[in-house]
Image (cartoon, rainbow, N blue to C red):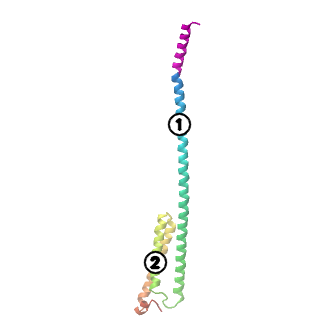
Amino acid sequence: MQPHQYALSAGIALLFLLSALPYLFSIARRRALDQGKEIGLAERDAIHLAKVRDLRAELDEIAIQREAEQRKHFTTIANLKRHIFEQDERITSYTELAVNRADYEKLIGAAETLRLTQRTLNALKSQTQADRAGAQAEAIVELAMRVHAQLRDIPTSTSATGTAG
């Protein structure tokens, strides 16, 4: 072959190469974009998975704390019921007035505690238990008012000493 044929064939090869390069570059660019997108999606999924895991752990901690608080409230209510039962037995065991000013103040304190329990249970969205605590608080207040009325009826010398009967 002649040198001009070599030059012509090199020119034709160069033209084919120059016409194929944009196509090859677009393929390489598309592959790079797809690979970057896959890497980004994998990182996003990993971050979301970690966040979900952290949120689940927080929810578990909150559930444990809420259960502990509910147990505490149930214990408080049980103690209040026991105390009310003891006071009721004490009152009914005597023929005379078996309560004093301190008992009245304890009843008022128990009613305030039940009111606090009612507000707490309302905040925890436990409406039936909150209503029950409210009803018990009302019953304690009524009992305290009866005790207060009886304390008014006794002479001041016995109520000043803190004993009755």
Query: Quick check: is 10 in the magenta stretch?
Result: yes
Magenta region = 1-20
Q: 165 or 153: which is nearer to us?
A: 165
* Res 67 quadrant in image: bottom right
What residue occupies the far top of the structure in this picture? 2
In this picture, is 157 found above or below 60? below
* Res 5 quadrant in image: top right
Q: Position of residue 32 (x, y in %)?
A: 53, 32
The disc placed on residue 109 is: 2
Q: What residue lies at 54% left-to-right and 28% top-to-bottom?
A: 28
Q: Nearer the viewer, mark 1 or mark 2?
A: 1
The three-letter code of the residue at mark 2 reads Gly
Q: Secondary structure at mark 2?
A: helix
Is disc 1 surrounded by few (<14), some (14 to 19) or many (20+) residues within 10 Å? few
Decide if residue 35 is in sight here. yes
Query: Quick check: is 26 in the magenta stretch?
Result: no
Principal secondary structure, stretch drawn in magenta: helix
The residue that mark 1 highlights is 36
Q: 143 or 68: which is nearer to us?
A: 68
- The reply to whether dot 1 and dot 2 touch (C-beta < 8 Å) is no
Is disc 2 surrounded by few (<14), some (14 to 19) or many (20+) residues within 10 Å? some
What residue occupies the far front of the structure in this picture? 3
In this picture, is 111 found above or below 157? above
